[in-house]
Image (cartoon, rainbow, N blue to C red):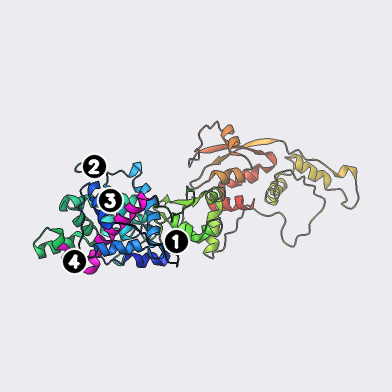
Amino acid sequence: MRRVFVFLFIVLVMNASHVSGQAIKGVDIEAELKEIEKRGQGLTVYRGAGVIDNIKEWLENENNATRIVAGRYFYFRNIISAEGMKIRNPWNGDLIPWFLYVLPAANTGFEPRFKAEDGASGMWPIPFRIGKKYGLTQAALFDQRRDPVVSSQAAIKYLYELQNIYRDWNKTITAFSIGPARLNQLIHATGSLDFDVIYQVLEPEERQPIMQFYAALVCMQVLEKRGELDKYPYLLPSTKTVVSIEQNVPFQAISGNLPIELEQLRELNPSYKADYVPYMGGTAFPIVLNKESADLFEQKRDSLAIWTRKFLGKEEPRINIGINPIQENTQLSFDTIIEVVDGDTLRIIEASQEVNEKAPNKTATNSSINNAASVNPTTPNSNSTVVANNDAKVWIYYTIKKGDALYTITDIFDCSTQEIKSWNAIRKNNFLIAGKKLKIQVPASKKAYYQKINTMSIQQKRNLALND
């Protein structure tokens, strides 16, 4: 299918500041083209109709568009040329030709979220069938064609495959942009392999890729020699990658609760479409955040499902951990004395009271309650104050469930990670394995409360940790 390209500056001006950019002056275009030829690696410079005019238009730098592209080129070139991106030519072992780094500047201005009219996507951009051919995942909420690293690997492999067919980088770049089927049609129509002959019969929009390519080449070369590639840098904060949870999470649920703007979240995660972090096939996807937000995300991971439900307007399910001994409309008695110790919560007190009522003579606290039962609450008495023994500790066993988080376990059992590792003779940091039992030390008076946690769902435990 023929791809229709929108003139690059129309796209860029929409994102550029609405001020007149300063032109890039003092450039000898022919001298720059000759220098490109001398740099070699198989590129024969083409000077056909429209190429020189396009170079001049880029040098005008309207609305600073050229310099904005240069800043993005400076940023993404480092990604493409990083050690892991050194894809070699499968036929001769050469590294990526230097001029291919510039191709996304010509096609999309290095915009990972670009989408062409025919559906091709990403900063190269890549058609659906080509993405599928090179194993890129393309789904409703997730598209690897928009991933700068993975899409670059696929695009370069495709370019090498085309170059192995056409043996001419001008034809290869044209075929990459308008499709090899269309280029082959023109070759058969003209009966010639000469690129200049083919270029003459291209539609005006089909010439754009070559014209933009040479304009970008000249401008990036000039600005690099002058040390001005990053005059308008593509600024992204220091980042950290964290793992999401086992459900689709809206971007707005994250940006609404962490110090990161929605647009920055989109910039850092271009592969995610429709502003959602997806959950597919049992895989929790990673999220790239600024470091401050990433650290908070790890601390508040168990709240992510709650943020999502609130954003979607769903009521949070209530937790039932047992019968509340203090029923509604029941007159409260003041003949029960409960010692509150550091770390107690109303939820723990209620649960322990329920156990004490069922087994009234098994703990020191129950003895205190029984002894205090005959005391008149309105008459001070030295015998009315009884201190319960809360120092006794017992062991319980908790079975790790799929989806458990260490933050939740330590929170709801009121202990530290180091204590759990010490009690269970664990040396590894990643020791949460579904089905494994953890031995945990708890106060004897709260044993029944903590044992109930074994029967709770993941959501109930997260909510308990949040409210504890």
Tell me the residue that label 4 is attached to.
202
Q: Is residue 36 above or below residue 447?
A: below
Which badge, 4 or 1, comes first in the chain's sequence? Answer: 4
Which badge, 2 or 4, comes first in the chain's sequence? Answer: 2
Which badge, 1 or 2, comes first in the chain's sequence? Answer: 2
Marks 2 & 4, CB-CB < 8 Å contact: no
Mark 4 is on which residue type? Leu
Query: Magenta part of the protein: which range?
Result: 198-226
Which badge, 3 or 2, comes first in the chain's sequence? Answer: 2
User: Real-space Cα distance between discs 1 and 2?
Assistant: 39 Å
**Foreground label between 3 and 2:** 3
Q: Is residue 66 above or below residue 457?
A: below
Tell me the residue that label 3 is attached to.
99
Quadrant of residue 142 within the rendered picture? bottom left
Indicate the quadrant containing the N terminus: top left, top right, bottom left or bottom right. Answer: bottom left
User: Real-space Cα distance between discs 1 and 3?
Assistant: 34 Å
User: Real-space Cα distance between discs 4 and 1?
Assistant: 38 Å
**Foreground label between 1 and 2:** 2
Say which residue appears at 20% left-offset and 62% top-offset. Answer: 48
Secondary structure of the residue carrying tag 4 is loop
Mark 1 is on which residue type? Asp
User: Real-space Cα distance between discs 3 and 4?
Assistant: 23 Å
Q: Is residue 84 above or below residue 288?
A: above
Which badge, 1 or 3, comes first in the chain's sequence? Answer: 3
Whether the magenta-drawn stretch holds residue 223 is answered as yes
Secondary structure of the residue carrying tag 3 is helix
Tell me the residue that label 1 is attached to.
275
Classify mark 3: residues with Cα within 10 Å, few (<14), some (14-19) or many (20+). some
Residue 457 visible in the picture: no
Secondary structure of the residue carrying tag 2 is loop
User: Real-space Cα distance between discs 3 and 2?
Assistant: 13 Å
